[in-house]
Image: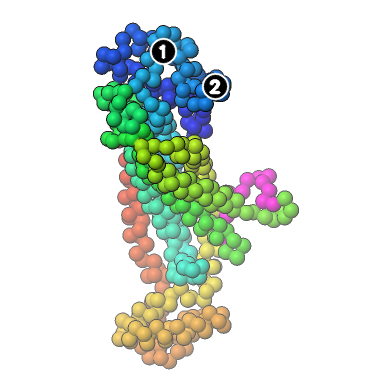
Amino acid sequence: MKRVWSEESRLARWLEVELAAVEAWAEVGVVPADAAAQVRERAKPPSPERVAEIEQRTQHDLAAFVDAVAEDVGPAGRWLHYGLTSSDVVDTATALQVREAGALIVAGLDAALEAVIRRAEEHRKTVTAGRTHGVHAEPTTFGAKLAGWAFELERDRERVVTALAGMRVGKLAGAVGTYGGGDPEVERIACERLGLVPEVVSTQVVPRDRHAELLAALAVTAASLERFATEVRHLARTELREVQEPFRGGQKGSSAMPHKRNPVVAERICGLARVVRAAAVVALENVALWHERDISHSSAERIVLPDAFLALDYMLDRFAWLVEGLVVDAARMRRNLESSHGLVFSQRVLLALVAVGLARDEAYRLVQRSALAAWDEERDFRELLAGDAEVTARLDPDELAEAFDLGRALEHVDVLFERLAALSDRTADRKGEPVHA
């Protein structure tokens, strides 16, 4: 990813666009064929240092680039940048960089998704407490939790792929998009050579709603990774200790406290999500430019595009590593579930009372009475219910026992894994397919 966004790569992409334009002009009969061949043979990406040196004089990076390339081409160099404006080259080259960077992001998403699906299946029946507001709610399984992550990653992938497709446009329409010094056929030919399609109507630039959609998709993906990492951080707290990050031999969790084994990678993912979200805000602010174009977007994009891709690429790599090596303490999960004295079955008791004819509000208050006592006095919820004459008058011991049956409480979890299996099949079927079908 660093290579994709390097200065050397940027200049190479600029040259790629310039050469495609010269050859398109030759195809429509404006540039002599031998001149186009000479440009193709002699033009080489200039060094960033040489471009910077010329830019000291021109105060224009694209003009400095064209001058630097032309130095080695000879007389045929006059055809470089023919009929183009700077944004024709910059925006079209950016699409090429985004395409390459996007393929790396999708590969990272696929690796993360594969890791999550595998661990979800592994922990399909690992019982744990479902929590809402940080408080025990009802039983679930750790695999079911991970299955939700898998489907969210798949949606992230779909969003990113759609946004990348929206960036597959080039633009060689001139200073205000009307081909004043150019030719729509040249744009079509050049874009086709580059694997792009022409922007339908441009100004001096490709409209920035495309870039905003892309960075928003990256930001949503980063937010998903933050959600998953936050869950890991919570479950790794001393009071829960249900999961732990991989911890290598020789690693130190703290410079001061030898016992520390902190969820530092998960925290790093959460921190970098803020960077990617901030990039999306910048992209949204770049949509509104003055008239056919101003330059307020340009400087910001040079920062936020590479930064967002680099940060998310790293986040995906670390998240896949985290999931693959996550230490899961199933016994601890079970003990934590049982620590709330059976309160996780309160809804099942409520439903059992409703099913035998009690009004819902009356049933709710009856169950809540024992539930609050179990909570405040740390007593067994089931025993409290069994000692409540109003409950036992309506539920016999077998009916009460069924309400506390963990297997019955989780009997429909398999439905989630049937859906996950279908997702796994889809991900296997698309292996090796190009990102932009």
The reply to whether callout 1 and callout 2 are in contact (CB within 8 Å) is: no
Prevailing SS of the magenta stretch: loop
Q: Nearer the viewer, residue 282 or 321?
A: 282
- Screen quadrant of the C terminus: top left
Q: Is residue 72 visible?
A: yes
Does residue 331 appear in the picture of this structure? no
Horizontal relation, residue 156 to residue 52: left or right: left
Which stretch is magenta?
241-254
* Residue holding disc 1: 77
Q: Is residue 7 magenta?
A: no
Kindly identify the residue that appears in the image at 33 percent across and 60 percent down.
415
| Few, some or many residues within 10 Å of mark 2 (<14, 14–19, 20+) | few
Q: What residue is drawn where x is 53% and y is 52%?
A: 270
- Snapshot quadrant of residue 49: top right
The correct choice, above or below, for 248 with respect to 354 in the image is above
User: Position of 126 compared to 327: left or right?
Assistant: left
Which secondary structure lies at badge 1? helix
- Three-letter residue code for mark 1: Gly
At a point 43% along the width and 64% down the height, the residue shown is 140
- Residue 134 spot, x, y in % from top left: 51, 67
With 418 as the anchor, is 324 left or right in this view? right
Q: Is residue 250 magenta?
A: yes
Foreground mark, 1 or 2? Answer: 2
Q: Which quadrant of the figure has residue 105?
A: top left
Spatial CA distance of label 1 from label 2 is: 20 Å
In this view, 81 is above or below 227: above
x and y, in percent, of residue 214 in the image: 39, 43
**Residue toward you, 391 or 150:** 150
How crowded pointer 1 is (Cα within 10 Å; few <14, some 14-19, many 20+) is rated as many
